[in-house]
C-alpha cells in the first residue's frame, strides 16, 4: 500500500490515507495527508462519521479499502454518501463467513474489486461477484530498488561463514504459514545435505511453538531471526526460498525472493503457483507433506546448474510484479469507476 501511495503521489494524484494513529504506515507516509484513526477496531467503526467528514474535507471521490477492516469502514461511508465510489482490494482466499456477509458486505455497494491473484478472484466469483467487477492486479515491488540492494548483512554474516547452503523462509508466524512443516522438511534436508541452514524471518503468535519444536528436536542449524526489513540483502545471500503455507492469497515474500534470483519451493495453494511455475522457476508441493518439500530442496541443492537456471527464470518471472506495471493498472481502474 505504501508503494502505491508513493507512486500516486509522485504521479500528481491527490489522495489522503486513513490508517490507525501511530501505525507503521502513518510513520512512513510523506507528502500525503494522513487521517489518523483510532488504534481500536470497534472505536473506528463507531466513529466512522469522523472518517466520513475527513473524506468530505479532502473532496475524496474514491475510497480504496486495502483490508477487511477498511472494507467495513468503506461500506459505512458509502451508506452515508452514495456518490462515493468504493474499491476494495481482496488479498486472501479465505471463504466468506456467511451468505448474509456475502450478500451485504461483498455483493452490494462495492463498485470494483481488485484481486491480487487469480486464486483470490476465483474466491470472489464463488460468492457471486460478477467477473466484470473483479480486476486482477497483483501485489507489486520496486524491482529496481531490489536489484540495487547488496547481498548479505551483519545479521547473517556469521551464519554465512558457518554454512554452505542457506534456505530462507519468511512471513508472519501464523498457523496458515505452517512453519512447522518447513522445519520438519528442513530436518530431512539437513540429514542429506551437509552444511545447510534454515533462516526463518518473521514474527507472530506461533513463534513460541516453533522455538519449542526446534529445541525439542535439538536442531542447531535453524535460525529464528524475527521481522527483518529490508528483506532483499538477506534473500540475496541465500540459495533457495521455501514457503510451506496451507493458505496464501498470493505470497509477497515469494515475489521478493524471485526478484532476488532465488529458486522457489512452495506450496501448491492459493496464488503461489502464479509466482512459482513448476519446474520453471521453482517446484510446487502439496501442503503438509514435509518429505515432498525436502525432496525438492535436496534436488535443487544437489544440482547447481538446475538451481542457476531456475534463479534466472525467477528474475524473469518477478518482472510481472513490478510496480511500474501494476500501478498504472490501478490508476486506470480508478478512472473507469469514475466514468472517465
Image: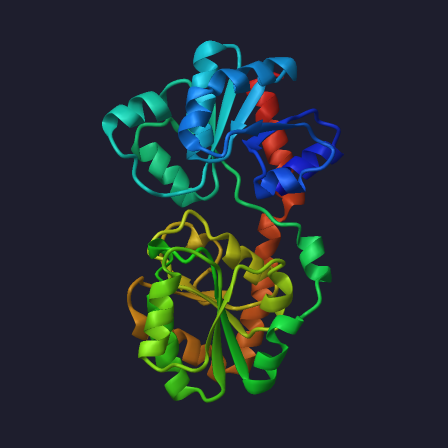
Work out whether residue 225 or residue 196 is closer to the camera in this orientation and state it.
Answer: 225
Number of numbered discs overlaid on the protein picture = 0
Residue appearing at x 39%, y 51% in the figure? 248
Examine the rendered structure and indicate whether residue 318 appears above or below residue 89: below
Q: Is residue 128 left or right of residue 333?
A: left
How far from the left and from the top, in percent, is residue 46? 42, 21
Q: Residue at x 42, y 80 (%)?
A: 298
| Colour treatment of the image | rainbow
**Residue found at x 47% / y 19%:** 48
Can I make out residue 14 in this image? yes
The answer to whether residue 110 of the structure is visible from this angle is no
- Residue 131 at x, y percent in the picture: 40, 29
Q: State which quadrant residue 179 falls in.
A: bottom left
* Vertical side of 38 occupied by 310: above or below: below
Which residue of the protein is positioned furthest toward the left in this rendering? 99
Percent from the top left, x then y, of residue 223?
48, 73
Query: Which corner quadrant of the image does residue 173 belong to?
Result: bottom left
- The residue that appears at 60% across and 74% down in the rendered structure is 156
Quadrant occupied by the N terminus: top right
66 with respect to 16 (left or right): left
Q: Is residue 110 above or below residue 249?
A: above
Residue 177 occupies which quadrant of the picture? Answer: bottom left
Check the picture and name the quadrant holding the C terminus: top right
Where in the figure is residue 291, as x and y percent of width and height? 31, 75
Is 261 placed left or right of 167 in the picture?
A: right
User: In the figure, 35 relative to 271: above or below?
Assistant: above
Amino acid at each position: 500500500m505504501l508503494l502505491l501511495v508513493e507512486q500516486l503521489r509522485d504521479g500528481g494524484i491527490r489522495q489522503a490515507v486513513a490508517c490507525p494513529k501511530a501505525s507503521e504506515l502513518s510513520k512512513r507516509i510523506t507528502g500525503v495527508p494522513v487521517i489518523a484513526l483510532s488504534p481500536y477496531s470497534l472505536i473506528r467503526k463507531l466513529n466512522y462519521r469522523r472518517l466520513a467528514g475527513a473524506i468530505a474535507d479532502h473532496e475524496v471521490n474514491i475510497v480504496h479499502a486495502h483490508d477487511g477492516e477498511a472494507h467495513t469502514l468503506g461500506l459505512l461511508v458509502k451508506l452515508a454518501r452514495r456518490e462515493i465510489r468504493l474499491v476494495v482490494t481482496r488479498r486472501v482466499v479465505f471463504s466468506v463467513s456467511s451468505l448474509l456477509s456475502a450478500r451485504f458486505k461483498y455483493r452490494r455497494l462495492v463498485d470494483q474489486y481488485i484481486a491480487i491473484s487469480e486464486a483470490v478472484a476465483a474466491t470472489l466469483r464463488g460468492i457471486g461477484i460478477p467477473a466484470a467487477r473483479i480486476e486482477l492486479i497483483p501485489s507489486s515491488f520496486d524491482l529496481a530498488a531490489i536489484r540495487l540492494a547488496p547481498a548479505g548483512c551483519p545479521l547473517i554474516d556469521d551464519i554465512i561463514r558457518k554454512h554452505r547452503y542457506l534456505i530462507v523462509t519468511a512471513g508472519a508466524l501464523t498457523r496458515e504459514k505452517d512453519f512447522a512443516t518447513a522445519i520438519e522438511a528442513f530436518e530431512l534436508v539437513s540429514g542429506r545435505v551437509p552444511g545447510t541452514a534454515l533462516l526463518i524471518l518473521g514474527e507472530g503468535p506461533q513463534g513460541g511453538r516453533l522455538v519449542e519444536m526446534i529445541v525439542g528436536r535439538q536442531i542447531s542449524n535453524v535460525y529464528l531471526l524475527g521481522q527483518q526489513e529490508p528483506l532483499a540483502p538477506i534473500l540475496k545471500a541465500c540459495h533457495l526460498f521455501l514457503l510451506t503455507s496451507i493458505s496464501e492469497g498470493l505470497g509477497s515474500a515469494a515475489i521478493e525472493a524471485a526478484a532476488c534470483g532465488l529458486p522457489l519451493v512452495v506450496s501448491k495453494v492459493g496464488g503461489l503457483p502464479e509466482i512459482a511455475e513448476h519446474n520453471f522457476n521453482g517446484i510446487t508441493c502439496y501442503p503438509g507433506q514435509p518429505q515432498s518439500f525436502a525432496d525438492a530442496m535436496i534436488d535443487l541443492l544437489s544440482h547447481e546448474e538446475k538451481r542457476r537456471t531456475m534463479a534466472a527464470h525467477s528474475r524473469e518471472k518477478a518482472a510481472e510484479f513490478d510496480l511500474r506495471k501494476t500501478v498504472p493498472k490501478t490508476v486506470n481502474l480508478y478512472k473507469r469507476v469514475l466514468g472517465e
